[in-house]
Amino acid sequence: MSTLKESAALDAAKRIHAEHIVIDSMAPHFISEWVMTPAMIELARKLQAEGKTRSAIRAVLTNHLLEYCASDAETRETYLAYWRRAGVTAGHVTLFGGGRPGSAWESLIEAFGRAGRMIEALRRAVAPAGTAADIERAWREKRHAVVYNIQNAEPIGDVLERVDTLHGLGLRSMQLTYNLRTRFGDGCLERNDGGISRFGEALVQKLNASQVMVDVSHASPRTAADVIAVSSAPVIASHTAARALSGHARALPDDILKAIAERGGYIGVLIVPGFLLAPNGDKRAQERGRPAGWATLDAVVDHVVHILKLVGAEHVGIGTDWAKPYYSAVEWAPAMVNESTSGFDWVGWRRQDRFDPNMQVVDMETWDKWPNLTAALLLRGIPEETVVKIVGGNFLRVFRDVCG
């Protein structure tokens, strides 16, 4: 932010963050994808030199941050200062995404355990939120909140009653699929699009009854359409983009975006460069001296504006899903991003999907720069009352409608 106009917009953005509830509908994980201390950067680079994969590096960094937040006041303050710079009240965070189906339940239960230990380590300065009132309380008390989700229903297995167990542990949002096919439906990167299964329909109905939000961010178009059709509650796409602009399989077509809004749902725009940009990239980033494949905040706002025109101001928000400091700390080779176990990559990114942690968004390289994104919305001429809805109000409304 350099010009007088940009400086004024940033000042206004920081005021909005101070005066209103701000929610990231797909924040980086509040342990494994959070702040990087100098010791963690050194550790990440050591692991990179050893050829470790993304998941292996993230696991080691998770344990380091958890240990030092519990035992070291300086690390704990560094962690909380990162939240404060972002000016975000609550983050919707993932406890299980893509991974081996056979170990999904155990992985999720372990993730709940780590989350609980981090909450205790932070002396309740960050707390889980199960209702909209919990988020509002955190804002009044100048604390922060996390809403737990899973991006893949594999932990449910063939036991729908696990939804009740997970709700009791604090889960408030679930996707039926990540990128690949599950027993519930097809993901956005599958070879064929068969929509949801009969068991997937049963899961949607169970989630509705248990007051758990259904998320279609990684769903194939037909899976998303089927979920919207059978759900009795509003559906969310916590972190997506407009396929009409990028052509990317991970983005949703306009008809699906409209259907979400028509049923009272919510659409969060992500900031992942590969999903935002058409294959020819973002010339604005290159003009600012960034490598091909980087995006600008203007590219993010392009998607926000497109979806605003499509569905109106009541249904659009921000779910960043990026700006993770450990991505910026090392250089990522393709082999480090591949998550193959037992000869198959259960996460599912292919070369053509342009999932590249080396690619960032200018002025949003790390999540603590969130006010720059709010300023970019204002600079585009979006009215402040609409910006307030985009950066938190719309997600809070749907969260209240579905979860209480």
Image (cartoon, rainbow, N blue to C red):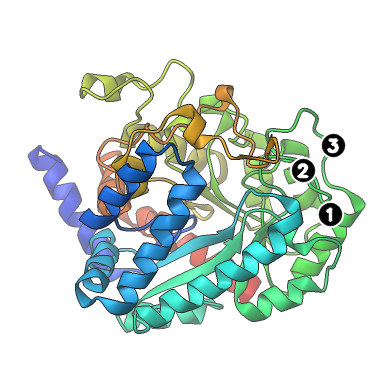
Q: CA distance from mark 2 to mark 3?
A: 7 Å
- Label 2 or label 3, whichever comes before in sequence order: 3
98 relative position to 14: left or right: right
Q: Nearer the viewer, residue 151 or 131?
A: 151
The CA span between labels 3 and 1 is 12 Å
Task: Tell whether 367 sits left or right of 150.
Answer: left
Task: Locate residue 124 relative to residue 303 in the image: left or right.
Answer: left
- Amino acid identity at mark 3: Gly
Please report the residue visible at 47 percent of the width from the left and 51 percent of the height from the top. 319
Q: Residue furthest top?
A: 280
Q: Position of residue 253 (x, y in %)?
A: 64, 33
Q: Nearer the viewer, residue 341 or 24?
A: 341
On screen, 55 above or below 354? below
Residue occupied by mark 1: 200
Residue 245 x %, y %: 51, 26
Q: Which mark is residue 22?
A: none
Q: Are marks 2 and 1 in contact (CB under 8 Å)?
A: yes
The residue indicated by pointer 3 is 194
Q: Quadrant of the C terminus?
A: bottom right
Give the structural element (helix, strand or loop) at label 3.
loop
Graded by Cα atoms within 10 Å as few (under 14), some (14 to 19) or many (20 or more), the crowding at tag 2 reads many
Secondary structure under badge 2? Answer: helix
The circle drawn on residue 223 is 2
Q: Residues within 10 Å of mark 3 (few under 14, many from 20)?
A: some
Residue at the image position 31 percent from the left and 43 percent from the top: 45
Q: Are there few (<14), some (14-19), or many (20+) residues within 10 Å of tag 1?
A: many
Q: Quadrant of residue 151?
A: bottom right
Q: Amino acid at mark 2?
A: Thr
Nearest to the observer: residue 79 or residue 270: 79
Q: In the rendered structure, which disc, 2 or 1, sits on the residue that comes first in sequence?
A: 1
